[in-house]
Image (cartoon, grey):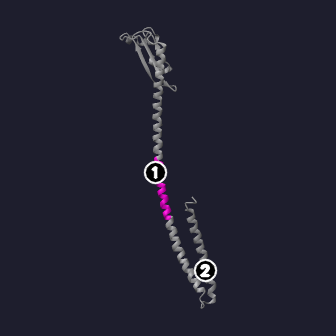
Amino acid sequence: PEIKRAYEQRTPVMIEDVRRHPLMADVQPFLRAIALRSVLVVPFVAHADAYGALFLRFARSQAFGELELSFLRTAASTVAQALYSAQHHARLEQRFAVLQRAHEAHLRELEVVNSRLQIASSSKDRLLEVCSHDLRTPLQVVLGNSEQLLHHEELPASCRPGLAAIQRQGRRAVQLIENLLDRARDRCDPQQL
């Protein structure tokens, strides 16, 4: 009962004579069998939480003076603070482990995304190469041949406006392709990012 009271009230319980104290009435039959006269229970309390108790018993009455009680309170307080710190440290370690696992999972996700971005960038580069070669080259052939035909002396006058239109539209198409390729290159320029 003395340990329970000290734990619940979070204060030391000192019983100078266990045979006469009312708190000990229920345990008198057990006390007769042992040579016990004095009991001191000092709870381990830190931040309003009880972590256990220091239990001392003596065969003589009035075994605990103020000096002993002060020393035991200090010792119990130190033990309680150490237990609190250990418990708090364990909780922090658990939280750190959870955060570490989350961080590692996030890094793996970023690696997957980065890999996909590299694949997409490579695909874009291949598309730019295809556009650069497969669109500009045929247009350059058309423009070159139409230029030669326009300067050909035997070309009928009725064909000249059509060839001039082919050249204008061809140059326009080349310029559109160049602008498109320039924009695609500019978007990928690391200095602009």
Q: Is residue 45 above or below residue 147?
A: above
| Badge 1 amino acid | Arg
| Badge 2 amino acid | Gln
Q: Give the range drawn in magenta.
A: 104-123
Helix, strand or loop at label 1? It is helix
Q: How would you rate the neighbour count of disc 1 (Cα within 10 Å): few for under 14, some for 14-19, many for 20 or more?
A: few
User: Which residue is nearer to you in this view: 79 or 119?
Assistant: 79
Question: Is residue 13 at all visible to an observer of this figure?
Answer: no
| Residue ID at (45%, 31%) | 86
* Residue 118 image position (x, y, % from top left): 48, 60
| Residue ID at (49%, 13%) | 66
Give the tally of numbered discs: 2
Circles 2 and 1: CB distance less than 8 Å? no
Q: Residue 108 carries which label?
A: 1
Q: In this view, does 125 lie above or below 167?
A: above
User: Which residue is nearer to you in this view: 121 or 82?
Assistant: 82
Q: How far apart are marks 2 and 1 (CA)?
A: 54 Å
Q: Name the residue under label 2.
A: 167
Q: Does the magenta stretch include residue 111?
A: yes
| Residue ID at (58%, 67%) | 182
Screen quadrant of the C terminus: bottom right
* Residue 138 image position (x, y, % from top left): 53, 77
* Residue 22 image position (x, y, % from top left): 46, 10
* Residue 165 image position (x, y, % from top left): 62, 81
Q: Residue furthest left?
A: 33
| Residue ID at (48%, 56%) | 114
Helix, strand or loop at label 2? It is helix
Q: Does the magenta stretch include residue 58?
A: no
